[in-house]
Amino acid sequence: MPEERFQNGLNVPHAKTGTESPAGSSEGQAPLGTATVTNPNPTLLDRSAGLLAANERWIVLATIVLQAGVLVGMIALKTWTVATGQTIYVRVMPVDPRDLMRGDYVILSYEFSRAGVIDGQPPRWDEPGNRTVYAVLQPEGDGKHWRINRFTQHRPDGGVFLRGDLGRGGRVEYGIESYFVQEGKGRVYEDAVRSGRLSAEIKVDSAGAAVVQRLHVDIK
Amino acid sequence: MAKRRLTDAQRHWLQDELQSWQDLSLLSETQRQGILDLYELPSESAARKHGAAMFILMSVAALLVGLALLLLIGYNWDAMPAPVKLAIIFGVVGGLHASAFYLRYQRGRDQRGTRLASEICFFLGSIAYGAAIWLIAQIFNINAHFPDGFWWWALGVVPLALCLDTLLLHTLVVAVLATWVGSEMIGFPHLGGWFFGRWGFVPNGCYSLPLFALPGLIWAYRKNKPLTVGLYVPLLAWWLVLQPLAWRWGENMVYFIGSVGALLLLVSECHKEGSRFALPYRLFGVLVAFGVLIPLSFYDFYRGVFAPEHQAFLPPLVIFGVGGAALGLFAAWQVRRDPLNPLAKPSLLVLLQRQWLPFGLLLLMAFMSLWTAAFGDLDLEAANVIPAVLANAAMVGAAYWLMSLGLREDRGIPFAAGVAYFLLWSVLRYIDLFGDFGGMLGAALMFFLCGAALFGVAFYWRRRKELRHA
């Protein structure tokens, strides 16, 4: 009868199909030894629940593999950039906070961290739209460092460029804005940047993704 | 059959009672012994207690050893090369999950102790997975959009929560998703919505949250677990409450928050009367909606609100639309439930009896939002009085609704909550209106009137109970 289906709330069939362990640490379980009632007219939910129960072991295994896959994926993305990217050096301006979740790290700011003009226009960070920005770089006279040439929202055909996201106030983030250091060692870099002696060694791949490899003081 | 447990005091009582029954010839010696054989012997009870004490002692010892190991690793963490760190991370995550898998599927799923141990191992493994995301980010200096870490964490835990039938994992899922929603929508409302890339023209509303939360909510209904429903309801409410930030309705969010509370109350009253599943919706609906009414009941509140610069009339239309749709669904469902039962009350009457306050609150929030949009910038005294009076009427109505709910379902907590809310309203009004004028006499009059009202309610409740139980 349709009335029997609505016993515990909104459209909840009271009978369940599939296997269900009688023991458990959660509330609401049937007592030990209670027989499971089979629903003669299983709904899509009943069938889904039955499928879940019948394949529980494989779903748990697949989830564990998914977790490992996420972790390996994080490593692979960055390893790919490191393995295939070009090494460049850029001058940095750090600010040092304390991040309770990730330990001691140095916030890095660069000449190209704020976009004054994008494709000849002021950055429209407060309007909805495309937020991807490319910072096209050019080498400095010292043959080591790179500096900003221009900002564009059209992916460049070649050369060295960084891909970033436009944020509040025209700030652009490229994923190279922090560098984790041993606890207490961040002060060394902060002192170096105040006197303009700090540089970041960065790996940049052909898509504009970048990874900070290390920081250098007084690079030659 | 496993013997039942008894404390020492219970055993002594049982033995004394059985002896007295035997002395009265109510029981034979064989029957007396048969009853005692149903329960564990003193030696068995002592062995069980000893086993439990040993388990606790060993658990504490294992915890301390684990903490020591953790601190040792933490102290040397910075000095370790990246491959060693990765080996430790994957070792911990994999080891915990492998142990949990073995305990659950190889050791025997019907043994309560191993099942509990497997659930704890899966929980710890899921926590370790989340920690691994941030540790790997630290090792490789990954500066990704940090709320994404919580999203990937939730993605890796939701299937386990649905499969493994444990409140621990659902609690973890809800905590992680709530953190993700809060950090994404409060910290980055200016970014576009994400769907395999950022879409700048789509508000950043964390639209994948229902995909994560609804399976858990449905699972909780099917497994008959109101406590788990009580985890997902505030999560969904939290997500709804933050939507104005994504859609740039940040001004005067209080009306939208109140309408979310009213929507929760509406859903609670859609449940069958007396259903335990209604309780989480009712609890959070009362906290949110009735809590919002408190500042709205002050006249001075409206001096500080202004009409929004953009989309001023959109929020109230959304509130009206959602409330109307929800009520229409409920009405249609009511009709569907009792199509042939001639003894059922007409659907409209049932609707009014249960939904007058939730829908009334929805209307009130929509009206106030409209009113602010229309007159907010004018700062007219008359324009500010009307919403304040309506909010006060709503507070009194809310208190009455709670009390009548308690009377209808014969439950003391809603009734007491209604009384407490009415007293709160009276104290707030005294502070707001009469504190500077009535003085001691004004306070005496107000308390007398409130006391008289409560006496009336108490007599009515007693009379109703007498009639019901007669």
Image (cartoon, coloured by chain):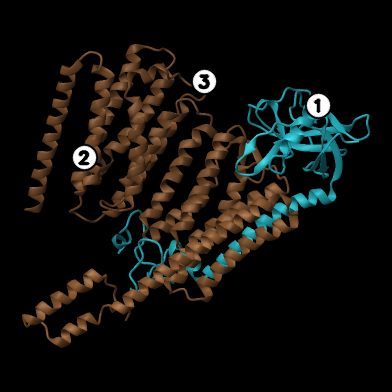
Chain colours: A cyan, B brown
Q: Secondary structure at mark 1?
A: loop
Residue B208 placed where, x, y %? 55, 47
Q: Chain of mark 3?
A: B
Residue B128 placed where, x, y %? 59, 56
- Mark 2 against mark 3, which lies toward the viewer? 2
Q: For the residue marked with disc 3, what is the amino acid?
A: Glu
Q: Is residue B35 visible?
A: yes
* Left or right of residue B374: residue B85: right
Q: Label 1: how many residues lie within 10 Å, few (<14), some (14-19) or many (20+)?
A: few
Q: Which residue is mark 2?
A: B403
* Left or right of residue B455: residue B307: right
Residue B343 placed where, x, y %? 17, 53
Above/below status of B283 relative to A193: below
Residue A145 placed where, x, y %? 88, 34
Q: For the residue marked with disc 2, what is the amino acid?
A: Met
Q: Which residue is mark 1?
A: A195
Q: Label 3: how many residues lie within 10 Å, few (<14), some (14-19) or many (20+)?
A: few
> Quarter-wise, where is residue B206 in the image?
top right
Q: How far is mark 3 from mark 1, CA to CA?
A: 46 Å
Q: For the residue marked with disc 1, what is the amino acid?
A: Ser
* Left or right of residue B365: residue A212: right
Q: Label 2: how many residues lie within 10 Å, few (<14), some (14-19) or many (20+)?
A: many
> Quarter-wise, where is residue A33 in the image?
bottom left
Q: Chain of mark 1?
A: A
Q: Is residue B327 visible?
A: no
- Mark 2 against mark 1, which lies toward the viewer? 1
Q: How far is mark 2 from mark 3, CA to CA?
A: 41 Å
Kindly identify which numbered label has been placed on residue B309.
3
> Quarter-wise, where is residue B390 in the image?
top left
Q: Secondary structure at mark 3?
A: loop
Q: How far is mark 2 from mark 1, CA to CA?
A: 70 Å
Above/below status of B448 relative to B400: above
